[in-house]
Image (tube, helix red, strand yellow):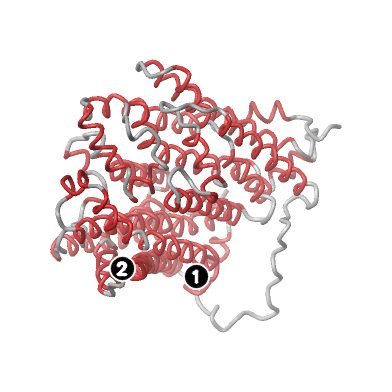
Amino acid sequence: MSALTGTGTLTRFILRRDRIRMSVWTVALVGTVAMTIPTLDEAFSTDAQRQARAALMDTPTGILFGGPGYGLDDYTLGAMVVNELTMSLLIATAIMSILHVVRHTRAEEESGRAELLRAGVLGSGAQMTAALVTVALLNLVIGGLSGALMAGYGLDATDSLAYGLGLAGLTFGAVTAVCAQLTEHGRAASGTAFLAVGLLFMARVVGDLAERGGGPSSWASPFAWVQQARVFDDLRWWPLALYPLAILALFGTAYALAGRRDLGAGLIPARPGPAAASPLLNGVFSLHLHQQRGAIIAWSVATFLFAISFGTLAAEVEGMLDSNPDLMAMLGDAAEDVTAGFLGVMSGYVVMAAAAQGILSVLRARSEESAGRAELVLATAVGRVRWYGAALAVGVLSTSLLVVLGGLGIGIGALSATDDSSWIGTMLESALSQLPVALAFVAATALAVGAVPRLMSLVWAWLGYSVFTTMLGALLGMPDWALNLSAFGMLPQPPVEPFEAAPAAVASAAILAALVLALAGFRRRDLAVG
């Protein structure tokens, strides 16, 4: 029997099993492209308007989220779409690829289903190959449709084809396949892959900021290669060749590592537990905290380091005003106000990360329930409210920790760049003012898991919508009522806007009420096992 025996059958099964998930991802990402192109064309219809927009993309903020910025001297519609949409699409496809590959590799081994399949007529490499084939098909469909939409709107067909191929790069799925060989748990594999993707993104940011057109660290990141092709400016195909080279190297590494480990095990062995439990593990809260300690530490370190990196860009914002008079006219006379606005935007991204971590923290209780471990604990003297309440407490505290570390990191970074120590207090206040926003997602997740678990997808949809409208809503000219549905705009955002106690108090009361209802719902509903 070949190592790839059964790959075709398993591929068809994955396509059928995930047909809704894959369709949603495709519609969401391709739909974003379909909405963005005509919106940008209408919002910036004259050369003067587009060149004013190009001036914004030549700032640290523009480079951070737009890349090196090719084609800014003659800012056509194609160059505008590439500069202002690419990073969002690549981040989304990275998340999609990570979740898909882990779901069909490491998670299948952890659940025991992979062992059952391998006991039949299924080759040792079929499962990973099927996961990589299906995620490749998904990426190709999204990239192909995006390129076709751009060509259909009248943009150059050759450049549109090159852009679609760049979006379809399977690098993130290949990175995940390697990460899935390292640990024996799906959650750890996902965390490792997200950390790797985050480091690749920061490598691109550092390289693009350090050197115009992209420095060495930028070239080491797949986030940069599609833009280094200079589509709709001065097209060059050879940067796109880096994608298949990296994919082949990563695939080969993943298969080689898979052959060196046992089914269900990771190359990094799990440490054996101590003979006696620590005195700290004397309660339900301690148990939940112990289970999530690795994820909390990883999220905290990553958030703090990224926040410091964002804060150090404060000096670049001030320096940019001296060399760009047009931008001075557009953004105002005071460099301090521009710097505060930039750091306030960075603080908002910290809150987004904290909200995502809070959702995942509460969902850990759901996974314990589905695996049957919660039932074993609740069969003892531990009550439902106590068990679920402890899980929610860990979610609230870990989310709060990320917000505090993010604000502190941005302030420290700004201090190192400007020698102004007041930024630490300012950015810490800014982050804390947005804490109810992050906790709102914790409360929504708690309510869904506690009362109606099948509605959990709505929480993820709300987070995705909120992130999308915050990043692109104003750019796309979305109406005020649509922007107001975003969680990240429901409270004033210091330091640009003054803090208001009344909205924060109302939001905090609503969060507390949702947590109480979540506990009541979990106390009354049946446990779901399997």
In the image, what residue type sits under mark 1? Leu
Q: Identify which residue is drawn at 40% across, 46% down.
A: 456
Q: Residue at x 80, y 51 (%)?
A: 260
Q: Inspect the image, locate mark 2, and give the three-letter code of the amino acid beneath it.
A: Thr
Q: Tell me the quarter of the picture where residue 335 sits.
A: bottom left
Q: In the rendering, at what x and y percent does residue 391 appear?
A: 44, 65
In the rendered view, tell whether residue 82 sits above or below residue 56.
above
Q: Is residue 438 left or right of residue 249?
A: left
- Can residue 378 be seen at all in this image of the molecule? no
Q: Which mark is residue 418?
A: 2
Q: Position of residue 198 (x, y in %)?
A: 50, 52
Residue 210, given in percent of the width and then of the height, sits at 44, 53
Residue 25, compared with residue 493, is above or below; it is above
The residues bearing labels 2 and 1 have C-alpha atoms spaced at a distance of 38 Å
Q: Residue at x 58, y 30 (%)?
A: 238
Q: Position of residue 63 (x, y in %)?
A: 38, 46
Label 1 crowding class (10 Å Cα cut-off): few <14, some 14-19, many 20+?
many
**Quarter-of-image position of residue 339:** bottom left
Q: Which residue is mark 1?
A: 289
Q: Quadrant of residue 133?
A: top right
